[in-house]
Image (spheres, rainbow, N blue to C red):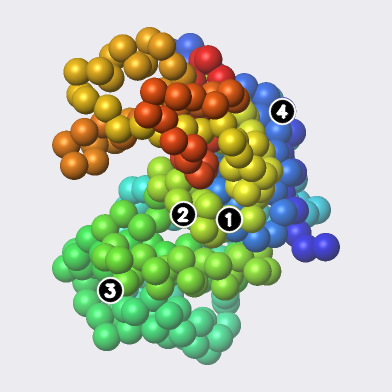
Amino acid sequence: MGIELRIDNLSKTYANGVRALDNVSLLIPAGMYGLLGPNGAGKSTLMRTLATLQEPDSGSAQLGDIDLLGQKDKVRRQLGYLPQEFGVYPRTSAEDMLDYIALLKGLTNAGERRDAVGWMLKRCNLHDDRRKALSGFSGGMRQRFGIAQALIGNPQLLIVDEPTAGLDPGERNRFYNLLAEIGEQVIVILSTHIVEDVTDLCTKMAIIHKGQVLYQGPPQDAIAQLNGRIWQCSIAKAELADYEKRYQVVSSRLVAGRPLIHVYSPAPLSEGFAPCTPSLEDFFFIKIRSWS
């Protein structure tokens, strides 16, 4: 069995009274692990805590045999972290900056570090721009550099927050292939609003809302809970409010100018409803609604 991350009863309340984490407990094995939740759910607080950037009020976290909250220097040598916004020294080249980060992560042998930096720059499609100042990078190039700095040093725990913002579809696919390859040996926590990415990439996941864990397990198990319970219907825009009063409407999106609604119901529905293959998005919306 590979390395595991065990989180027990993590809680965090900010000075303004917001309870960002409310007794969060998760067992995260090696592989790709999806973290889903709306804005303000507590995902970023959890990730910043795991990345040793802030302290919880209570609880514990263990990465293999490392106390994640008490042995922060040790954790940082095993950690790769790509936040949504990350700062760099703008006049430094990508190569020099990556070399410095590799040194911080414990790659002290100059030859090994040079080889690791060169290999990572090629892997993230930045080798041709390695001597360019980071201030001259486009948004997509900056994101690829962020990926490179997170991956350098062979981390055992990789935390990525909305990692494909600014990437074109080809870059996005390359990055996810890279993550999937890395995730065979290490823990990769993927926080994203793109629910399909969790369905496609992650073997396990959790849904967090208002600081609490609402679900943890395989995405396919979550979807299977809704088999035979999701119905869809195309309606007029003026009817939407009425349908929302009468049914448990999971979602609504415009198709050819008309709302296509998904409705949760254990019993079959008439009135133009057709059975619909459930998705992880359906499950996600149901879990975060008060009527679920």
Circle 4 Cα neighbour tier, 10 Å, few/some/many (<14 / 14–19 / ≥20) = some
Identity of the amino acid at label 3?
Ser
Task: Please state which amino acid type lies under the numbered disc 2.
Answer: Asp
Q: Residues within 10 Å of mark 2 (few under 14, many from 20)?
A: some
What SS does tag 2 mark?
Answer: helix
Can residue 113 be seen in the rendering of this structure? yes
- Mark pair 3, 2: CA separation: 32 Å
Task: From the top left corner, tell me how far across and down residue 210 is, in percent.
Answer: 52, 22
Q: CA distance from mark 4 to mark 3?
A: 42 Å
Of 160 and 63, the residue lying toward us = 160
> What is the spatial separation of the Cα atoms under label 2 and label 4, in whole angstroms?
28 Å
Label 1 with label 3: CB-CB less than 8 Å = no
| Residue 15 screen position, x and y as percent | 47, 15
Tell me the kind of residue under disc 4: Asn
In this orientation, which residue lies closer to the viewer: 55 or 18?
18
Decide which of tag 2 and tag 1 comes sooner along the chain. Answer: 2
Question: Tag 1, which secondary structure?
Answer: loop
Tags 2 and 1 in contact by the CB under 8 Å rule? Answer: yes
Q: What residue sits right under mark 4 in the picture?
A: 9
**Label 1: which residue?**
202
Label 2 – label 1 distance at C-alpha: 8 Å
Of the image marks 4 and 3, the number of the one nearer the N terminus: 4
In the rendering, at what x and y percent does residue 143 appear? Answer: 32, 62
Disc number placed over residue 93 in the picture, else none: 3
The answer to the question of whether label 4 and label 1 lie on touching residues, with beta carbons closer than 8 A, is: no
Numbered disc 4: secondary structure: strand
Q: Earlier in the sequence, mark 3 or mark 2?
A: 3
